[in-house]
């Protein structure tokens, strides 16, 4: 039996830290809002993640929101670097 590939959520948690908060979704693109604490949601395409980022940038992610800190990260590009 081969080694099972970790979930996108597991890869994101490994990248952002166990104290990060998963919001929703599944996919290889993470929308990250690290304003007060690190929160992330997962999306299937970069377009979906960017669309949601635009919404969050306009509405805010919560207290102490600083929209210029929000970003989208392709998790596939971090997977090998993390040894996932």
Image: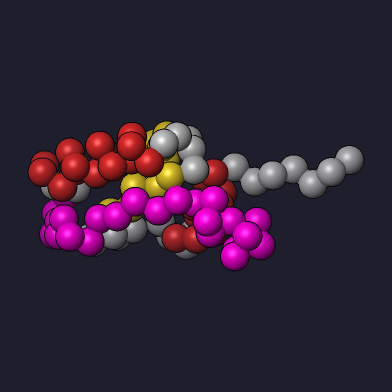
Q: Residue furthest left?
A: 58
Q: Was residue 68 drawn as part of the magenta stretch in this picture?
A: yes
Measuring from the top left, give residue 67's x and y in whole percent.
Answer: 16, 55
Measuring from the top left, give residue 41's x and y in whole percent.
Answer: 37, 42
Foreground residue among 8 and 81 = 81
Measuring from the top left, give residue 58's x and y in whole percent.
Answer: 10, 43
Which of the 4 image quarters holds residue 33?
bottom left
Q: Is residue 8 left or right of residue 73?
A: right
Q: Is residue 39 left or right of residue 77?
A: left
Measuring from the top left, give residue 44's x and y in whole percent.
Answer: 45, 34
Identified at 54% across, 44% down, the residue is 8
**Colour convention:** secondary structure
User: Is 18 located above or below residue 51 in the figure?
Assistant: below
In the rendered image, the quadrant that contains the N terminus is: top right
Q: Was residue 75 drawn as part of the magenta stretch in this picture?
A: yes
Residue 44 visible? The answer is yes
Q: Is residue 10 left or right of residue 26?
A: right
In the rendered image, the quadrant that contains the C terminus is: bottom right
Q: Residue furthest bottom?
A: 81
Residue bounds of the magenta highlight? 62-84
Q: Residue furthest front?
A: 47
Residue 23 visible? The answer is no
User: Is 76 located above or below residue 83 in the figure?
Assistant: above
Q: Is residue 78 left or right of residue 70?
A: right
**How many numbered marks does the figure carry?**
0
Identified at 17% across, 60% down, the residue is 68
Identified at 74% across, 43% down, the residue is 4
Which of the 4 image quarters holds residue 56?
top left
């Amino acid at each position: 039996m081969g080694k099972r590939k970790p979930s996108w959520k597991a890869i994101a948690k490994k990248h952002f830290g166990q104290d990060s908060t998963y919001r929703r979704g599944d996919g290889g693109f993470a929308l990250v809002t690290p304003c007060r604490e690190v929160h992330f949601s997962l999306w299937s395409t970069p377009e979906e993640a960017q669309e949601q980022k635009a919404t969050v940038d306009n509405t805010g992610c919560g207290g102490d929101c600083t929209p210029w800190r929000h970003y989208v990260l392709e998790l596939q590009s971090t997977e090998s670097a993390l040894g996932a």
